[in-house]
Amino acid sequence: MLLHQGYSNHPEKPVRLSIIWSYLEEVSLDAICPLIKGRTATTTELQRVHKKDYLDILQQYCSNYQPNTAFPSQYGSGIYFNEHTWSCASFAAGSLCEMTKQVLSDDSLRNGMALIRPPGHHALSNFANGFCYLNNVAMAAAMAVEEFHLERVLIIDFDVHHGNGTQALFYESNQVMYFSAHRWEEFFFPKTGKIEEIGEGKGKGYNINVPLTGFAYREEDLYYIFVHVLRKLIQQFSPELILVSAGYDAVKQDPIGKMNVSIQGFETLTQLILFFANECMTTPKVIYALEGGYNVTQIAECVMASMKALVLYSHSVCSQEEVDSFYDTSKVSPITITTCQQVAHVLEGIWKL
């Protein structure tokens, strides 16, 4: 996954992943939790989510790649190719599918984190976009539904960017719920993820967006959203599997996100997800997949914070008083509170928020 690389100043670069591994080696990760060997995605896994013609184009372009040749102009923002792009993207997606398969098959495995790149949540069925080529999390969710016959899969996306690809792929599904809390501005990529985008057909009400606009949000805002919106959704939807699109570009000093979430904030967010899972799921299963995060030092520290919580709190539950103690309500922006009220209004009659 390190061989996929573009021009030197592109923010989605191999060092994002290699520095995470260097941090993990220092703490002897293999002594703390089992490591799952990655693999390439199967044709079946790929075609559950992506159009065959699109997959063929990606493979052919990478196979025929020559330095300094133009990449297909029909693809979106931030896309680059080299001869390794297809193999790296397919390995990333396949590795997440393999982790999901093993966690679902083994009762002793409750949680996992897939450290993969390129990211995936902007990838559409036939369109590479926003540094993403294959939608890793969508492929894992589709596999869980098709192979393991799960009826309720929840995807939580806390990347600073809305996961437009994941939303589109499950917009008419009531088996996969997509929840995203993200920055939203008219000029901010990908310009999707409005409150009113709640799904269609059988999927109406199963696509939930909490867009934060007009200010640099902090972890207290995300805590409030998780406690007052996400927790209630988990209680009512009762997922059998939670997949997390873990983007760390909302951290302070990220060059793209420009938000104010602390590194410690991501540990607490993970704690909250685990607490909610443990109080609502018979056999909690929570799997993280790396998405964005472009400050190369901080992304490693954020991943370490999340992994710490996944290891320490996998079986933890807490009281309402303990949940309330996680954050100071005076630090929550009035915009966040109003946005959550608007989300509740749009979903009225579908979910009680």
Image (cartoon, helix red, strand yellow):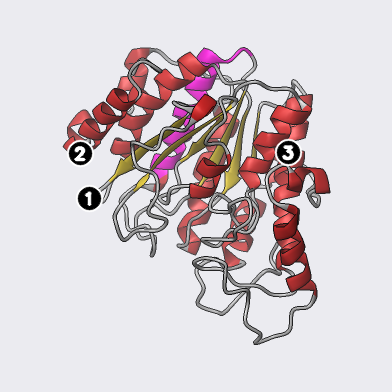
Residue 2 shows which numbered tag? none
What is the three-letter code of the residue carrying label 3?
Answer: Met
Q: Quadrant of residue 186?
A: bottom left
Which quarter of the image is occupied by the N terminus?
bottom right
Residue linked to disc 1 = 215
CA–CA distance in space, label 1 to label 3: 36 Å
Tell me the residue that label 2 is attached to.
Answer: 335
Q: Residues within 10 Å of mark 3 (few under 14, many from 20)?
A: many
Q: Residue at label 3? A: 99
Q: Are marks 1 and 2 in contact (CB under 8 Å)?
A: yes
Density class for disc 1 (Cα within 10 Å; few <14, some 14-19, many ≥20) is: some
On the image, the x and y values in percent for residue 220 come to 29, 36
Q: CA distance from mark 3 to mark 2?
A: 38 Å
Q: Earlier in the sequence, mark 3 or mark 2?
A: 3
Tell me which segment is drawn in magenta.
Answer: 264-282
- Residue 179, above or below 10: above
